[in-house]
Amino acid sequence: MVPAVKKITAVVLFIWSFLPISAQDTYSYHKGKIKHRISAGPVLSFYKNHPQHTVNTQAETGFCASYKMEIAIERKTGLLVGLEYLSHGLTFQGYYSAPGNTYLFDRTFAYTHEIRVQEIQLPIAYKKAFNLEKDNFYTPYFFLGVGARYIIGSYYVITNDSTGDVVYDGKGSMDFEHQAATQIVNKLFKGVHQTITREYNAFFQGGLGTQYNFRNSAKSIFFEITYKYGISRLHYEGYQNSNDLNIKDSHWGFTVGVKF
């Protein structure tokens, strides 16, 4: 994880060097003032799978990148609103029912399932700083909020462990166990098909950060640790309804970014 953070930091500093902004203008304050934040970094994920249908559930390394606006509320508080990309995945051993067949729950778990999920998220959070950035080189802060998540794609690889044969390698149809968003959208827009909204859901988020303020340019570079907890479990159907699993997920993001 450390080499990835170093590479991302180098990219962030490169982008930062091309952002010529007046220090006097940036450090001036007025309610509603907007600053821009670009960040990226690795993601550490955690999954809780069905104990009767799966074993050896392990997370794969994830990645996130985001753009957010920081809208000033008071001198030490603000609202973070933006757009984020999240890629995460997991592997586990479980059952597999070939199309038109059934399987016996004999706890052999003869198939390995590899899943990769891509999401677009809309986070919104309240940010509270512990000092004024215009008066300090370092500004620690915390943030709390919620967000909407939408699965834009998923990919599955299912392998027979005894033979090594790949029984499926292709696009998936990951969605969520509970689909409250579907009901809301269908009420607002009559005639919208359920499949349009079944990939929508929400999450809670919170985190800590610290930023270094460059006094000669009023730009900042920051490091954040963010925790996200999915409200609804992921729903995995495998290939042609070969499986029926609900998987709880949460994620820790470690990001480096610039604010300007």
Image: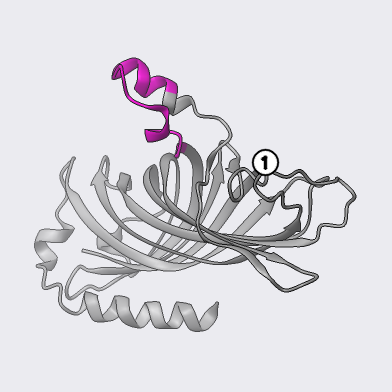
59 in relation to 234, above or below: below
Q: Which residue is pictured at 39% across the width and 21% down the height?
A: 184
| Number of marks in the rendered image | 1
Nearer to me, 199 or 165: 165
* Image quadrant assignment for residue 149: top left
Q: From this viewpoint, which residue is outermost toward the right?
A: 106
Residue at mark 1: 244
Q: Is residue 220 left or right of residue 145?
A: left
Q: Which residue is pictured at 37% across the width and 27% down the height?
A: 193
> In the rendering, at what x and y percent does residue 94 appear?
76, 55
> In the rendering, at what x and y percent does residue 78 appear?
31, 44
Residue bounds of the magenta highlight: 183-201
Q: Secondary structure at mark 1?
A: loop
Q: Which residue is pictured at 15% across the width and 72% down the height?
A: 19
Q: Quadrant of the C terminus?
A: bottom left
Q: Quadrant of the N terminus?
A: bottom right
Nearer to me, 182 or 17: 182
Nearer to me, 200 or 205: 200
Nearer to me, 218 or 254: 254
Residue 190 in magenta? Answer: yes
Residue 51 in magenta? Answer: no
Q: Amino acid type of disc 1?
A: Asp
**By what rule are the colours in the image chosen?**
one colour
Few, some or many C-alpha atoms within 10 Å of disc 1 (few <14, some 14-19, many ≥20)? some
Q: Is residue 247 left or right of residue 161?
A: left
